[in-house]
Amino acid sequence: MCKQTLSSGLEDYLECIFNNITANGSVKAIQISKELSVSRASVTDALRRLAEKDYINYERYGSINITKKGINKAKEVIDKHNILTVFFKEVLLLSGEEAAENACRIEHVITDNAFSKLKEYTIAYMEKGHDK
């Protein structure tokens, strides 16, 4: 049984929102649309669904603000992405592009237990001087 609270698509939106707010202090729907290569209507629908789940505060044509719950979830997804990218690139020796592509796919479906073990392994591997 799948216990995922957000679809992979909504996790991508949340990650985009978090990264833009962190880098620029704010984000607009048009920026999300361009960055994720989706229509404005898709962005509006995703923002509405994220707001319903209390990951963001959003009113149509208003500002987009991320909640504490949203920040925590975005950081979790970003951590998974980063660790998976390092694992694929440094341990499995995939190219940076292929490592990032696979990380983006797997970050949404890996179980917490599997990720915890992979993270532990990757950190230990890197600490043993395998990093370049």
Image (cartoon, grey):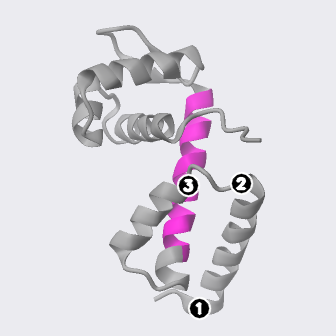
**Mark 3 secondary-structure assignment:** loop
User: Looking at the figure, which quarter contains the N terminus?
Assistant: top right
Q: Amino acid at mark 1?
A: Gly
Mark 3, residue position: 107
Question: Disc 2 to disc 1, how far (Cα)?
Answer: 27 Å
Mark 1, residue position: 129
Q: Which mark is residue 111?
A: 2
Q: Residue at x 39, y 19 (%)?
A: 45
Q: Residue at x 27, y 34 (%)?
A: 38
Residue placed furthest toward the front: 1
Highlighted range, magenta: 69-87
Q: Residue at x 22, y 26 (%)?
A: 30
User: Residue 60: percent from the left, percent from the top?
Assistant: 34, 8
Q: Amino acid at mark 2?
A: Thr
> Cβ–Cβ below 8 Å for labels 1 and 3?
no
Question: Disc 1 to disc 3, how far (Cα)?
Answer: 25 Å
Q: Quadrant of residue 119?
A: bottom right
| Placement of 98 over or under 46, stated as above or below | below
Q: Which mark is nearer the camera, 2 or 1?
A: 2
How many numbered marks are there?
A: 3
